[in-house]
Amino acid sequence: MAKSGNGKYDLAVISIVVPAFNEEHYLSSTLAGVDRSVALLQARHHVSVEIVVVDNASTDATASVASSLGARVVFEP
């Protein structure tokens, strides 16, 4: 955790990175499992968590599924 200018500690930020290529049919269940783990992590610790799906040039709806489920999508050709 980093100290902010006011002397208090900011929340730690954890990024969970999920690589994906043409995973539109499986991504929902994968991210549901990640969400369950994130909920446990946040219940036990004071952290902020972001989920990042790295779309490796998918030709299906992987990116839109990830985005609709609240993940940040990063494109990787």
Image (tube, rainbow, N blue to C red):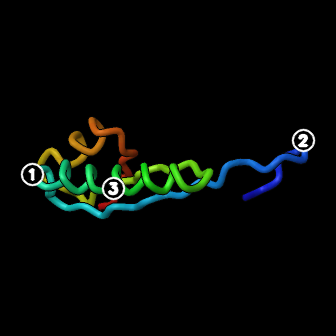
Task: Point out residue 69 in the picture as x, y percentages from the top left corner.
Answer: 29, 39
Tell me: residue 21, above or below residue 46. Answer: below
Classify residue 10 as left or right of residue 12.
Answer: right
Whether the residues at callouts 1 and 2 have beta carbons within 8 Å, the answer is: no
Q: If you read the primary sequence from the N terminus, does the residue marked by circle 2 or circle 3 appear first?
A: 2
Question: From mark 3 to mark 1, how far is it between C-alphas?
Answer: 16 Å
Q: Residue at x 13, y 52 (%)?
A: 59
* Residue in the picture at 21% in, 42% down: 65
Q: Residue 35 location, x and y as percent?
A: 35, 50
What residue is pinned by disc 3? 34
SS label for mark 3: helix
| Mark nearer the N terminus (1 vs 2) | 2
Say whether residue 61 is left or right of residue 39. Answer: left
Closer-to-camera residue (12/17): 12
Instruction: Provide the secondary structure element on which disc 2 rests.
Output: loop
Residue underneath mark 2 = 6
**Callout 2: 10 Å neighbours few (<14), some, many (20+)?**
few
In this picture, residue 13 sits left or right of residue 18: right
Against 63, is 15 above or below? Answer: below
Left or right of residue 2: residue 64: left
Q: Which residue is mark 1?
A: 25
Q: Position of residue 43 (x, y in %)?
A: 51, 49
Q: Amino acid at mark 1?
A: His
Amino acid type of the residue tagged 3 in the rendering: Val
Name the residue rendered at 40%, 61% in the picture. 17
**Which of the two discs, 3 and 1, sits closer to the camera?**
3
Residue 5, percent across and down? 88, 44
Is disc 1 placed on a helix, strand or loop? loop
Q: Residue at x 33, y 61 (%)?
A: 18
